[in-house]
Image (spheres, grey):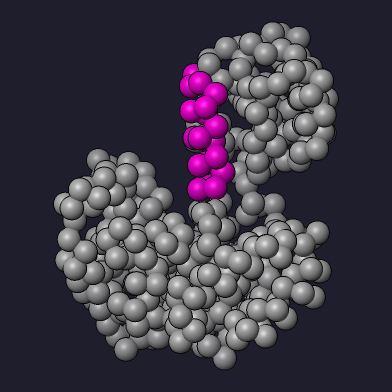
């Protein structure tokens, strides 16, 4: 039977896909025959008339193995599926059987299998298919991917370890750690966990190309019009909503970095304040309103792109946040960058082999 590693995460947008596939590439470099599966499809898009998760297709291309989409992703964990499951229209035992059968098909004859968790550790609980449940089902050990900002984050790490069970825990990998948190993590958090028999296999630093999307990509994903004739290759990692007075807005905007300010296209006072803040990389204007020519001119002078969408502010915030969290680590270049980062900042041998 293949050695099987399930990669789970404590929150969305923590780089789980990139880490899972990058570990597969490390294993391939060791001349291992690897396979991949994401039993619960959670990052769903409509494509060729079907609702699918694109992560398995990326993994299949990069890891160069043969498997059908329905084998890699037997459960399409869509909002409709969740509603049906809550109404009793999904059979947990049948779903578990499908997951196990497809796993056995893909794993047959392979040296190693990588299972990517869906969403977070607890996703799938309504049909008894949390990541911990799946680990039991396919006899996998589990790597927990976590972020780290402060010691309070360790509450969630320890809760995950309890859920998974010490016998299945391969260890913890911290990802996208800011420089400001690095010393505290290494000096305090890691020894704290290791004293409790929780192995920590590395701390990958935050790098910008994996932490956000470019303004151009954001505009494409939102179907936005670009009003300015300036480059759109700056990164957006977070959003700031301009719904206050101009003075308060300027103070707020000056405290942010690599941000897009989301506000109505008719709020020229907010536009002007945002363009004074060095950490604002984009104006994302809602409601289809075009700003004044003075604002557009100032934005071009400052080199800050303005993009406009037809949707209202609340809808735009929701969509934009999904683009930024879902847009991370979703292409070959990002996965290869993660492969380099793991080689430099993680104990890949320990992750792969449980050493």
User: What residue lies at 71% left-to-right and 12% top-to-bottom?
Assistant: 268
Work out whether 221 lies above or below 207. above
Q: Is residue 175 left or right of residue 78?
A: right
Q: Which of 293 and 74 lies nearest the eye of the viewer?
A: 74
- Residue 267 seen: yes
- Residue 214: image quadrant is top right
- Residue 193: image quadrant is bottom right
Q: Is residue 59 left or right of residue 334?
A: left
User: What residue lies at 23% left-to-right and 69% top-to-bottom?
Assistant: 96
Work out whether 324 lies above or below 128. above
User: Does the magenta-highlighted stretch encompass residue 48?
Assistant: no
User: What residue lies at 71% left-to-right and 65% top-to-bottom?
Assistant: 151
Q: Which of 322 and 79 lies nearest the eye of the viewer?
A: 79
Residue 93, x across and y down, in percent: 19, 68
Q: Main secondary structure of the magenta part?
A: helix
Q: Residue furthest bottom?
A: 355
User: Does the magenta-highlighted stretch encompass residue 325?
Assistant: yes
- Residue 217: image quadrant is top right
Q: What stretch of residues is rendered in magenta?
A: 310-327
Residue 348, x across and y down, in percent: 59, 81
The C terminus, quarter of image: bottom right
The N terminus, quarter of image: bottom left
Work out whether 15 lies above or below 347. above
Residue 300, x across and y down, in percent: 76, 21
């Amino acid at each position: 039977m293949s050695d099987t590693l399930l990669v789970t995460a404590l929150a969305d947008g923590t780089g789980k896909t990139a880490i899972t596939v990058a570990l597969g590439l490390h294993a391939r470099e060791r001349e291992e025959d690897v396979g991949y599966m994401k039993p619960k499809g959670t990052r769903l898009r409509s494509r060729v008339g079907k609702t699918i998760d694109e992560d398995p297709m990326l993994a299949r291309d990069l890891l160069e193995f043969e498997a059908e989409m329905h084998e890699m992703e037997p459960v399409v964990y869509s909002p409709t599926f969740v509603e049906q499951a809550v109404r009793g229209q999904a059979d947990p035992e049948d779903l578990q059987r499908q997951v196990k059968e497809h796993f056995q098909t893909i794993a047959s004859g392979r040296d190693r299998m990588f299972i990517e968790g869906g969403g977070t550790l607890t996703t799938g609980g309504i049909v008894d298919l949390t990541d911990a449940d799946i680990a039991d089902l396919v006899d996998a050990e589990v790597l927990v991917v976590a972020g780290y900002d402060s010691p309070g984050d360790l509450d969630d790490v320890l809760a995950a370890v309890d859920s998974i069970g010490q016998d299945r825990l391969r260890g913890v990998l911290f990802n996208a750690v800011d420089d400001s948190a690095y010393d505290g993590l290494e000096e305090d958090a890691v020894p704290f966990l290791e004293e409790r028999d929780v192995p920590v296999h590395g701390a990958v630093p935050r790098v910008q190309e994996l932490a956000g999307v470019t303004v151009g990509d954001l505009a494409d994903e939102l179907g936005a019009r670009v009003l300015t004739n300036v480059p759109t290759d700056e990164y957006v990692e977070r959003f700031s909503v301009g719904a206050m007075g101009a003075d308060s807005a300027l103070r707020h905007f000056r405290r942010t970095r690599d941000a897009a300010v989301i506000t109505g296209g008719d709020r020229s006072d907010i536009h002007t304040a945002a363009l004074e803040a060095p950490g604002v990389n984009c104006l994302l204007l809602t409601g289809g309103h075009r700003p004044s020519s003075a604002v557009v001119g100032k934005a071009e002078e400052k080199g800050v792109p303005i993009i406009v969408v037809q949707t209202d502010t609340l809808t735009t915030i929701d969509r934009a946040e999904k683009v930024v969290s879902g847009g991370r680590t979703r292409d070959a270049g990002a996965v290869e960058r993660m492969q380099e980062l793991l080689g430099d900042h993680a104990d890949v041998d320990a992750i792969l082999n449980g050493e």
